Amino acid sequence: MKTMKVALLMTALIAAPVTGSFAKEAPPAETKVMRDGDSAKTVRFENMHQTRFIELFFGTKDPKTGKLVAPCFNTMYTSKKPPASKDTSPQALVKSLDLVQLAKEYGVAKVMLNGPKIWMPNWVEIKMGKERDFGGMTMGWVAQLNLPDSGTIEGAPWKPMQIARDSKWAWTKGTKVALLDDPEGNTWILKGFQLGLNPQQTWQEYLAKGTASYKQFPAGWKFRVKTLEQDVIEIPDNNLATIMTDELFHVWDKTGPGMTNYKP
């Protein structure tokens, strides 16, 4: 089974504004989702730009190691053809999810929700495992995350972190992207646009508003919007990506040497 280890955890694909402690006792037996990545195979997904999705993390203890882990499932990555609307996580279904009941049903300590978000890259290559139905939404296994001893999933806004990841993706030529330039000369590209359960603005409104969307935009940083003149392809060195979440829970990936083919 492929695992993904993080320092301060964000997803393979995006960050989750959730916290919570796990039960002290290990589950009496291996949970239903622990083996869902055993037969995972690399799959390529095209035309993913602006797909709406959620992820679910099933926080539990690995019965073999006693370590806290979280198998992750994503609505974007399944064998089903995506709807024309690109909405893989309808709002009514997301709001009706009973995370407490799911935790009981699957024998885990806690189920955590990431999103809804809008995905920004155009194509993705990712390992996908077993598919399951959660609350009427088909979701594919995409990762098993190793959690810190605190059992929390949270990242400090505007603080870069590294995450191990066995996947790659790209923003293709002609795509309109949001970029951040930090004082150290790094450029960050927006990967996941946070909607949440109670959306505050649309993607287009966010692009138009820019830094005014934030209450604590960092001094010395710059926000810009660009239509790409060539593909930005992200294949991190040693499968170790540098990512960051902002105060609105949008997720950004670092570009340039070691991360992407160039810095836009």
Image: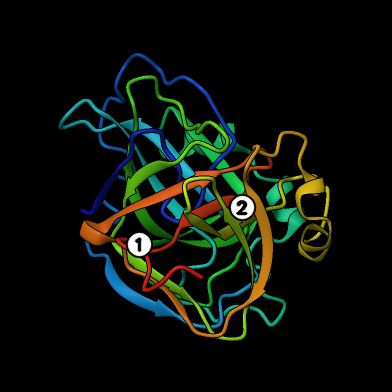
* Residue annotated with mark 1: 259
- Foreground residue, 179 or 20? 179
Q: Position of residue 245 (x, y in %)?
A: 55, 43
Q: Earlier in the sequence, mark 2 or mark 1?
A: 2
Left or right side of 237 for 154: right
Q: Which amino acid is tagged 1? A: Met
Q: Residues within 10 Å of mark 2 (few under 14, many from 20)?
A: some
Q: Which mark is residue 135?
A: 2
Residue at position x 58%, y 59% from top?
190
Left or right side of 74 for 69: left
- Foreground residue, 98 or 89? 89
Q: Position of residue 136 (x, y in %)?
A: 62, 59
Q: How is the image coloured?
A: rainbow
Q: Position of residue 78 (x, y in %)?
A: 46, 71
Residue 107 in sight here: no
Total number of numbered discs in the rendering: 2
Q: Is residue 65 above or below residue 170?
A: above
- Foreground residue, 132 or 197? 197
- Foreground residue, 33 or 172? 172
Which structural element holds mark 1?
A: loop
